[in-house]
Amino acid sequence: MRRTLKLIGIIAGAVIVLFIAALVAVGMLFDPNDHKDEIVAAAEHATGRKLTLDGDLELAVFPSIRIAVGSASIANAQGFGSAPMAKIGSAELKVALLPLLTRRIEISEARLHGLELNLARDARGRNNWQDLGGASSAQAPAAQSGGGAAQGLDLGVGAIEIADARVTWNDAATKSHWELTSFGLTANGFGSGKKFPLKIRFSLAGADVKVAVDASTQATLALADNAYKLEQLDVKIDGSGAAWPGGSGKATLEVDSLAANLGKESLELNGLTLDVLGITVAGSLTGQKLLSDLSLSGAVDIREFDPRNVLGAFKVELETADSAVLHRASAKANLLYTSSQLGLRDMQLKLDDSTLTGRVGLEGDKLAYNLSVDDINVDRYLPPSSDSSAPADEGSLDEVDLPLEVLRKLDAAGELKFGKAKFSGLTLTNASFGLTAANGKLKITPKASLYGGTWNGQIDLDVQANAAKATIAQQLDHVDLVPLGKDLLGSADVAGIGDVKLDLVANGSNLGEMRRGLDGNLSFSVTNGALEGIDLWYELRRARARLDHDPEPERGDAPRRTTFASLAATGTVEDAVLTNRDLAGALDFMRIAGTGTVNLLDDKVSFDLKATMIDGPKLQSDPAMVKYAGDTLPLRVTGTIDAPSVLPDFGALVKSRVTKEVDQKLDEKKGEASKRLTDRLRDRLSR
């Protein structure tokens, strides 16, 4: 038995010696450079491109298989110039021989130096590598479950190095040019399921931007399981150029872990932190069914930053009415993506002292949202008011065209709420703006509480072929006009509790056309009101004194104010002009009725009123005015809605009264003459 084992050992040893000797002989006797022509011919047959081998070919098979290639290049596709599509300075691969017998691949070194790739696309969209493809996907053998040929294969790599690589991209279709230069990659101690250090660096330059990237990570690759993991990923970016904010700057990206399992179609990203432009973004992401029915969920947190500093990096100087705004902003949200929807949930966006919460997303092609703002003063963010007394150019607004195509395709449903909001001086509380849009039809339903009253309404927009039809129904109920006037107009010329109702229709393709073509109905009423700046009672007494050549009444310190119990009117609107025929008002010394117009484009008013003097305490307070009780006084109202001018035509009243007195005296004389004639006839008949 011992002799048998010894014999077997001698034979095995001899075989191994002969095998090693054969390998050494192959390495010594076989020169791959003698076969360059065959290699070039085979490559050209396979690719249709000319392969040039300027450097030497090296081959060794013991104790490691070593393959080395010197300078080499492959020709470009026809129509893409004479420069090679790809070339290398050198390449080398060392593989341990004996471990191959046990299905273990041990690569001690894999190096590639001086790679140059010239990639291009012509104006017709044809690229210079599409003719190099191998078998189509239909001809490729089906992958086996669990990693196919890689299953059970043990792989180890001592060192991988790619140095001084360069890639250029020329796109004639978009007239763009990009260069990736100084690309380098190093990895050491790589093995299946084993953590190893990986470093990548490169520069990327386009027409307006250049970035230098330096990245390092601890990578783990499990090829048999199709699983990949990066830990402690650290990426540093140094950018410059006209397209880089501020002309130059740095950004950093850190990731605690990024794991992908293609077999299970899963992705897990944790501890992402991005710092750029003074903004820090943190987040996480989970993915499922990566290759079949992708779904993603995660969270993003944009930590507080100064928006003005960011705008400054873009060289944007933004003037606001309040310089204290746009200094604090932050955001948080949860991300959701599936094949049927994309959305942000649990949003919390903060800007200065305001917070927006809610959700927004795309459900197919439909935009759906539900957003709430706690408190915001929009006026603080508007441009500062001009000190110029010149009238503002409002024509530019009239020239704004409606985005008809966008509105026609818009599919949306949502609501935007405000706990408190201020805009153009107006303060709204518990406001909401609902929106539904589909098939070219939009509906907006605003409502809010304001100044002790309510605002409700509906705006419908029907997008037609070349224009849109807007139907506007709005209603204000029981609104206190004093604070409304102060906030909206900067004055309180009209006091009282007001109600307004309007039903208007407009057609057009831009805002100016729609404003000028307003048609419909409008009504308003004011109770317990007053006109500030106008003392109609004093003006009546002064006009009477002038006509009677009496001393003017004392003005005193009383405010210029005319109170009234009620004022109401209805009217029709045609081409943005309101025509009223039933204005009625009740003061404590007169009743008013009349007709007139209001231009809704420039707010100019023109009314002819008839005021009937009413006997009462007010009229009785001036004995000289008592005689006008029951008489009618013409009033002329001009000016604008916010600054009306009321002029009484007292001369017409005096003329009317004189005419009345003359008629009365004539009637009296006629009566006396008739009586005398009657008496004479009676006397004669009695004789």
Image (cartoon, rainbow, N blue to C red):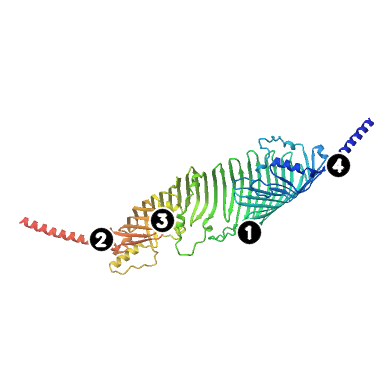
Q: CA distance from mark 3 to mark 2?
A: 37 Å
The residue carrying pointer 4 sits among few (fewer than 14), some (14 to 19) or many (20 or more) residues within 10 Å by Cα, namely some
Q: Residue furthest top?
A: 1
Mark drawn on residue 656 = 2
Residue 157 location (% of width, % of height): 78, 44
Residue denoted by label 4: 24
Q: Is residue 500 visible?
A: yes
Nearer to us in this view, 356 or 273: 273
Nearer to us in this view, 88 or 272: 88
Who's the residue at 95% across and 31% down the image? 3
Who's the residue at 87% across and 40% down the image? 21
Nearer to us in this view, 451 or 132: 132
The residue carrying pointer 2 sits among few (fewer than 14), some (14 to 19) or many (20 or more) residues within 10 Å by Cα, namely some
Q: CA distance from mark 4 to mark 1?
A: 60 Å
Q: Is residue 63 visible?
A: no
Marked residue nearer the N-terminal end (3 or 4): 4
Residue denoted by label 3: 601
Q: Is residue 97 above or below residue 610?
A: above
Q: Amino acid at mark 3?
A: Leu
Q: CA distance from mark 1 to mark 3?
A: 47 Å
Marked residue nearer the N-terminal end (1 or 3): 1
- Asked whether the beta carbons under mark 4 and mark 1 sit within 8 Å of each other, the answer is no
Marked residue nearer the N-terminal end (4 or 1): 4
